[in-house]
């Protein structure tokens, strides 16, 4: 394993270790090298390795057993949503299959959140969605539209009033923010994205219409991303 530069922070140790676990370099139930051995391999001090291992434990990627060392866990079976942002890009390469799965989950989540929002939104939230939809229709560039899209979808999720939805959306958002340029494709050709219909249905309390309108928007965005991925 190549050593890390001397100027590396504990965060870089964590990134190396998490990459090794998620890529399968260390298989489930395999023991990690001792912290002393890892420090020697990476050319860093023990404190940096301890911090990296602590973060692996927080992600439920490894567990430390007394007398049995650090065992790698099966992250696909036992990991949480917070693993997504690390799993989606390994070695500088995006896992395109996982990107597609994330956006499939996003579409389904947004559709159901829109239906809930139609029943639970406040007047202020309904008005904000209307304003954002209008601004999206006149956004000058894709980078501006991308920020407005994030705000629009976040307002829909907030309006749904479901904490579990919000936490799931936060994890998807973290993946999104890590790769803004790639995901900018979802707001291209905005004339085919009817945010106004979503906002209007939510404002009118029409759960069925809100679900259908959001499904149309999120499905179109998903298709554009798949097209961009090639």
Image: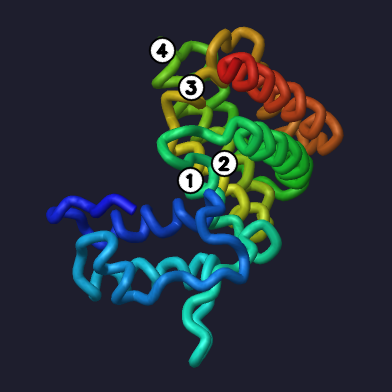
**Label 2 sits on residue:** 155
Query: Looking at this view, is 200 or 142 the one in front?
Result: 142
Q: Residue at x 70, y 41 (%)?
A: 105
Q: Residue furthest left?
A: 7
59 or 220: which is nearer to us? 59
User: Tag 1 or tag 4, which sits nearer the N-term?
Assistant: 4
Q: Quadrant of the C terminus?
A: top right
- What residue is disc 4 on? 141
Q: Could you tell which of marks 4 and 3 lies nearer the N-terminus?
A: 4
Query: What residue is shown with label 1?
Result: 174
Q: Are marks 3 and 1 in contact (CB under 8 Å)?
A: no
Looking at marks 2 and 4 on the same chain, the residue that comes earlier in the sequence is marked by: 4
Q: Is residue 127 visible?
A: no
Disc 3 is placed on an element classified as: helix
Residue 184 marker: 3
Question: Is residue 34 left or right of 117 when viewed as pictured?
Answer: left
Which of the two labelled residues, at mark 3 and mark 1, occupies the earlier sequence position?
A: 1
Please provide percent x and percent y for residue 93.
47, 33
SS at circle 1: helix
């Amino acid at each position: 394993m190549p050593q890390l530069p001397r100027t590396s922070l504990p965060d870089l140790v964590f990134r190396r270790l998490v990459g090794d676990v998620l890529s399968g370099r260390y298989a489930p139930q395999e023991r990690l090298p001792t912290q002393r051995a890892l420090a020697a391999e990476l050319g860093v001090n023990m404190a940096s390795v301890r911090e990296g291992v602590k973060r692996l434990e927080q992600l439920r990627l490894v567990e430390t057993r007394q007398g049995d060392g650090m065992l790698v866990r099966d992250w696909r079976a036992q990991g949480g949503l917070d693993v997504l942002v690390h799993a989606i890009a390994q070695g500088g390469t995006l896992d395109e299959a996982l990107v597609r799965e994330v956006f499939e989950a996003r579409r389904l989540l947004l559709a159901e959140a829109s239906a809930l929002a139609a029943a639970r939104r406040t007047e202020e939230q309904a008005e904000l969605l209307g304003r954002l939809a209008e601004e999206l229709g006149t956004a000058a560039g894709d980078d501006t539209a991308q920020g407005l899209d994030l705000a629009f979808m976040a307002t829909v999720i907030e309006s749904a009033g479901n904490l579990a939805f919000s936490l799931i959306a936060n994890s998807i958002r973290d993946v999104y923010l890590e790769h803004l340029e790639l995901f900018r494709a979802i707001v291209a050709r905005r004339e085919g994205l009817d945010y106004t219909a979503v906002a209007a249905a939510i404002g009118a309390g029409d759960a069925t219409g809100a679900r259908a309108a959001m499904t149309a928007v999120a499905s179109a965005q998903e298709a554009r991303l798949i097209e961009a991925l090639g």
